[in-house]
Image: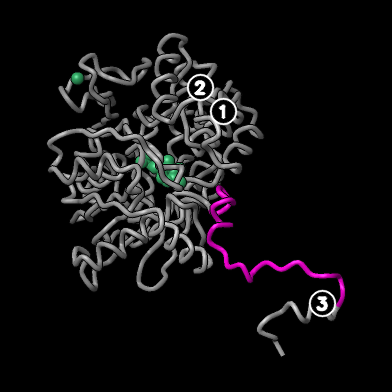
């Protein structure tokens, strides 16, 4: 079997053309394939000359290293091809520039393509908002019914509006994300609706391309650190797998270290890391960063492997630290949602702890767009920035302080 689903716990293999999310032993499944015999030059050439959506996509540009699929069967917006910004010696890969405003689109294009190949007519997920927005958009494009499970009253207005606009049925669950997650897994098992959370191995496949495209942005000269927010741990898992495969294919000759950053109020992975992963923790999650307000991360085992493979680490930052970092990122003219700002807050902390050394090359992944969470923005602006004035020249001139002339 070239392409297969493979259990990360016991190694058992399953075919890719049947619906399956976990192993009989309960372990998580990885999509695996033989190492592709394709050079990174092909990806560079495609990026430079792309004319059609599958080449313009920062996901499908790497298709030989993803899954075998007819080009005509691909459901792509296209997505990816996000920019890499440099500010103050730190790189920011802005995944908020994806079509629905978060990196979730990279996983969704692959998983929805797989849903169509499997003959699914309906798809579902539990979500803190971004997965649901992305699922709804791709399901609309593919003509699939979309059902999303969100914690009632706990997702931002921007994300809820997107999800509804794209036409999904939105079930507002009276419970937290972890409860919604448990529920959607059971409903999908019972009903045959195809599950599109990151427990679905095809989501992880698409999200690997964040790292591959970042490496490509840097001319395949890996940074010392890749820093990302960690919630359900799908992305942390994807980053580890992307680096393992890039190394096996000979695209890079050394591995960056992964720094996964959690909010202190939603820190089960940090707790486990602090004990050298001796125990798996679960917490009741609370943080302003709603995208990572998750207490029982599904992809725990895969994420542990990613941290170990890359000699990586897990850190935590307080809500105050991450909101201060968000304001900084916003004021750089880039902008992001609160969860994304854990990256810069983490860098600040790890630098002052001496873990990140001067001169080390650092890339932060900004996972979501500024506009996803307008309420959070209003908490970081200065009072003086917003002034109501009478509609007269005199009043306007008085309101511009300090005066311009
Ligand atoms: C989903 C999401 C995360 C967390 O990613 P996980 O794979 O769940 O760890 C972080 N930031 C944003 C903006 C997200 O949408
Ligand atoms: Zn198994």
Q: Residue at x 49, y 69 (%)?
A: 332
> Which quadrant of the rendered structure holds the C terminus?
bottom right
Q: Quadrant of residue 162?
A: top right
Rendering coords of residue 283 (x, y %): 30, 35
Q: State yes or no: residue 18 in magenta.
A: no
Percent x, y for residue 235?
A: 35, 42
Crowding at dot 1, Cα within 10 Å, few <14 / some 14-19 / many 20+, comes out as many
Q: Nearer the viewer, residue 2 or 93?
A: 93
- The quarter of the picture where residue 219 lies is bottom left
Displayed-image quarter of ligand 2: top left
Residue 295 placement: quadrant:
top left
The mark that comes first in sequence, 3 or 1, is: 1
Q: How is the image coloured?
A: one colour
Which stretch is magenta? Answer: 370-392
Task: Give the labeled residue for mark 3.
Answer: 395
Please say if 13 is above or below 84: above
Tell me if label 1 and label 2 are in contact, CB under 8 Å: yes
Question: Can you give x and y, in whole percent of width and height, for residue 137 in the image?
Answer: 58, 34
Mark 2 Cα shell of 10 Å, populated few (<14), some (14-19), many (≥20): many
């Amino acid at each position: 079997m070239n392409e297969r689903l493979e259990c990360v716990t016991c190694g058992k293999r399953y075919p890719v053309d049947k619906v399956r999310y976990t192993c009989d032993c309960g372990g998580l499944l990885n999509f695996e394939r033989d190492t592709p015999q394709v050079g990174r030059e092909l990806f560079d050439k495609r990026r430079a000359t792309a004319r059609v959506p599958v080449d313009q996509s920062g996901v499908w540009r790497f298709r030989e290293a993803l899954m075998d699929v007819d080009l005509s069967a691909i459901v792509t917006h296209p997505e990816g091809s996000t920019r890499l910004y440099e500010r103050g010696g730190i790189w920011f890969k802005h995944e908020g520039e994806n079509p629905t405003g978060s990196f979730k689109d990279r996983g969704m294009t692959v998983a929805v393509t797989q849903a169509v190949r499997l003959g699914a007519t309906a798809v579902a997920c539990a979500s803190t908002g971004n997965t649901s927005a992305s699922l709804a958009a791709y399901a609309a494009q593919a003509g699939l019914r979309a059902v999303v499970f969100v914690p009632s009253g706990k997702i931002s207005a921007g994300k809820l509006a997107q999800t509804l606009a794209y036409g999904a049925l939105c079930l507002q669950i009276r419970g937290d994300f972890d409860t919604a997650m448990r529920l959607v897994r059971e409903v999908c098992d019972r009903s045959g609706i195809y599950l599109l959370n990151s427990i679905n191995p095809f989501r992880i496949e698409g999200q690997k391309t964040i790292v591959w495209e970042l490496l490509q942005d840097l001319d395949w000269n890996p940074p010392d650190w890749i820093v990302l927010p960690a919630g359900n741990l799908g992305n942390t898992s994807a980053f580890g797998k992307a680096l393992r495969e890039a190394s096996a294919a000979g695209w890079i000759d050394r591995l960056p270290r992964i720094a996964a950053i959690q909010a202190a109020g939603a820190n089960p992975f940090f707790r486990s890391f602090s004990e050298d992963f001796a125990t798996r923790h679960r917490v009741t999650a609370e943080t302003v960063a709603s995208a990572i307000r998750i207490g029982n991360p599904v992809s725990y085992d895969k994420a542990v492997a990613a941290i170990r493979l890359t000699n990586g680490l897990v850190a935590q930052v307080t809500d105050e630290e991450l909101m201060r970092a968000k304001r900084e990122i916003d004021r750089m003219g880039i902008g992001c949602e609160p969860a994304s700002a854990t990256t810069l807050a983490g860098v600040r902390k790890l630098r002052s702890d001496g873990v990140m050394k001067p001169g080390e090359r650092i890339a932060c992944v900004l996972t979501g767009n500024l506009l996803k969470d307008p309420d959070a923005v209003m908490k970081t602006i200065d009072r003086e920035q917003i002034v109501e004035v009478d509609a007269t020249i005199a009043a306007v001139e008085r309101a511009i302080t300090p005066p311009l002339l």
